Image (cartoon, grey):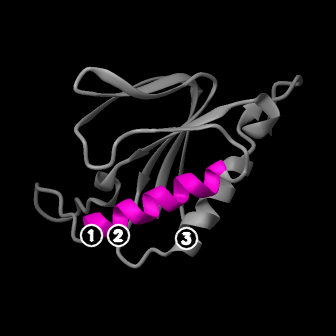
Amino acid sequence: MKAVVQRVSEARVEVDGAVVGAVGRGMLVLLGVAQGDTERDAAWLARKIVELRIFEDDAGKMNLALADVGGSLLAVSQFTLLGECSKGRRPSFTGAAAPDEGKRLYEYFVEQVRQTGTPVATGIYQADMQVHLVNDGPVTFILESP
């Protein structure tokens, strides 16, 4: 499982011109599910992201987690994170999970984040989405489950 985590001052996702998920201060997480990923991967990644200390404290150091700043998380599925681009010019997505399994594990990830008490907004799985964000910093990290 792979995630791109961006610290945002605001973010929203639209489908067909309508906002389906939005957050203020917090994180935008683009999440890709790979073949072979399990609920254990999703739970590990959810915990890791929620506890990631990427918000600045009073001294200006990245020392605070999402809960410390009262932040929210916007989770958007993005299978293209599993795209393989090393050969040829067209990405291959053979490493991505099948759609049904990808959806199941994406939803499981979201539920694991919610169980921490973190407010979560989402996109719509497999929809054509437009993601708008203000990356605060900019601060961006790429995380993969073990």
Q: Dot 1, how many residues are within 10 Å of its Cα: few (below 14), some (14-19), or many (20+)?
A: few
Residue underneath mark 2: 101
User: Is 57 placed left or right of 46 in the picture?
Assistant: right
Secondary structure under the numbered disc 2 in the rendered image: helix
Query: Which one is in front in this view, the residue at disc 3 or the one at disc 2?
Result: 2
Q: Where is residue 117 in the image (x, y as percent from the top left)?
A: 73, 45
Give the distance between the C-alpha atoms of the residues marked 2 and 1, in whole angstroms: 5 Å
Q: Nearer the viewer, residue 10 or 87?
A: 10
**Residue 103 shown in magenta:** yes
Q: Residue type at mark 2?
A: Glu
Residue at 31%, 55% (x, y): give it: 79
Q: Do the residues labelled 2 and 1 touch (CB within 8 Å)?
A: yes
Identify the element where label 3 is drawn: helix
Query: Residue 27's mark?
Result: none
Magenta segment, prevailing SS (helix, strand or loop):
helix
Q: Residue at x 63, y 33 (%)?
A: 72
Residue 55 visible to an observer of this rendering: yes
**Residue under pointer 3:** 41
Q: What element carries label 1?
A: loop
Q: In which quarter of the image is the C terminus?
A: bottom right
Q: Earlier in the sequence, mark 1 or mark 3?
A: 3
Say the numbered circle drawn on residue 98.
Answer: 1
Alpha carbons under labels 3 and 2: distance apart: 13 Å
Residue type, mark 3 in image: Asp
Q: Check disc 1 and give the amino acid type.
A: Ala
Query: Is 25 situated above or below 62?
Result: above
The stretch of residues the image draws in magenta is 95-114
Residue 106 picture location, percent across and down? 44, 58
Give the quadrant of residue 36. bottom left
- Residue 116, magenta (yes or no): no
Q: In this view, does 63 lie to the left or right of 84?
A: right
* Vertical position of residue 8 compared to residue 34: above or below: above
